[in-house]
Amino acid sequence: MSAARESNWADNLNLRSNPEGLAGYAAHAGDSRGRLIAEKPSPTRSDFQRDRDRIIHSDAFRRLMHKTQVFVHNDGDHYRTRLTHTIEVGQISRALARALNADQDLAEALALVHDFGHTPFGHAGERVLNEQLKQFGGFDHNAQSLRVVTQLERRYAGFDGLNLCWETLEGLVKHNGPLTDRDGDGLEGPVPAAIREYNQINDLELWSWPSVEAQCAAIADDIAYDNHDLDDGLRAGLFKLDDLVDVPLTGALVALVRDLHPALDDSRTTHEIVRRQITLMVEDVIQEALGRLANAAPKSAQAVRELDYAIVSFSPRLEQQEKELKAFLFDKMYRHPSVMKNVAAAQAILSDLYQVFWQGSAALPEDPQWSLEGLDEFARATRIADYLAGMTDRYAVAEHRRLFDHTPELS
């Protein structure tokens, strides 16, 4: 196909201009700040669609299937994993972006990539690596996600990582908000080294809010795990429907569903409550975001970045109710004795693995990517953390069994 014909084809498909219907404040693929390494545009996909596709086809995305959300890999077939959580976040993120006339592909891409840096065994694994790397600045899963997509994925002939667009990288790093003030000082302590180092070669404007699309992905994450953890906790018997009566947001829905369907079994009652709660939360965010957009009237994605508050947010009332739901889940689920038993076992497994590689009594894979030869202590710790963070739950258990006489039981 000739270059001229290819260009006309892309223009006719409206892929390289701003997609019709997107608001001015949306991130427009045709106006992307581009990739760190220049690439020829696709004639059939926008840059944000291309980013989403690269994310889906990555090794890191597939590994999410065997990484813990709350329950470890062998607890049961119907509990969420990092992958099913990620897919649910993607669906909600697209729904929000659609309602706000923002770019759905970028919103979905950011939802699908947001947990790439998570360790095996969920936050239990992250706490171990943070402790082991304390003298080197600690471990942060958002910074690790950036390392995955800029260095650790090795699929393409021309570059390491996925060479994602500036807007995708910005949203990945800042989806929860600015990391620094205008002078570069961290807002919540030092900025992780991986983010600082990358920012020196590709300025992600760490002082600013991210795009509307990134904000959609961030709040979709909250909505998804609030609701699927509620569903999983009830399924696991960690608490009962009656325990939710005093939780303002969910308790009102328990009463409503029981009033509408008094003979419904607990399983269907749970599903009815969860689907109604997701809808309620999504519609609240849309209404609140539209109000904030009307008040701020941003004319561009950059104008959104330069605001001093988030556009995509819960209303104040629902924000408080969501915090109360989180507090309930923290107490009744995340700190439940059966969950904490597995947390202790998982932390022991990952701590043992870190120490055995650090001490040199076991070797990382025979691949130049994982060689520790000639590295200083910081680089050595980082490489071991890269390897461990990339493990799935079951691979970490298998490695521990290979290297140790006794492996803590996960159940």
Image (tube, grey):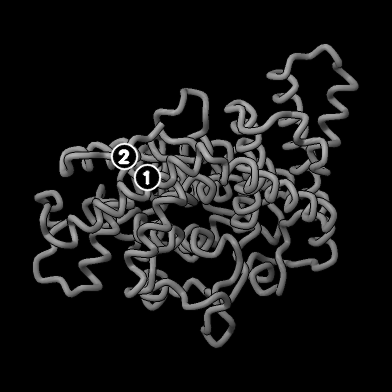
Please report the residue visible at 66 percent of the width from the left and 38 percent of the height from the top: 227
In this rendering, position of residue 225 left or right of residue 285? left
Q: Position of residue 377 (x, y in %)?
A: 20, 73
Please report the residue visible at 35 percent of the width from the left and 53 percent of the height from the top: 162
In this rendering, position of residue 38 left or right of residue 174? left
Q: Are marks 2 and 1 in contact (CB under 8 Å)?
A: yes
What kind of residue is marked 2?
Answer: Pro
From the viewer's perspective, is residue 411 above or below residue 391? above
Instruction: Give the class, few, some or many, for how many residues have Cα within 10 Å of label 1's Cα (few <14, many ≥20).
Output: many
Q: Determine if residue 63 is in view.
A: yes
The disc at residue 346 is 1
Q: Nearer the viewer, mark 2 or mark 1?
A: 2
- Residue farthest bottom in this picture: 183
Q: Secondary structure at mark 2?
A: loop
From the viewer's perspective, is residue 60 above or below residue 134? above
- Residue farthest top in this picture: 263
Which is more N-terminal, label 1 or label 2? 1
Q: Quadrant of the N terminus?
A: top left
The residue identified by callout 2 is 408
Total residue callouts: 2
Q: Determine if residue 19 is in view.
A: no
In this rendering, position of residue 274 left or right of residue 333? right
Image quadrant in which you'd find residue 26: bottom right
From the viewer's perspective, is residue 55 above or below residue 30? above
Q: Position of residue 177 (x, y in %)?
A: 61, 66
Q: Quadrant of the C terminus?
A: top left
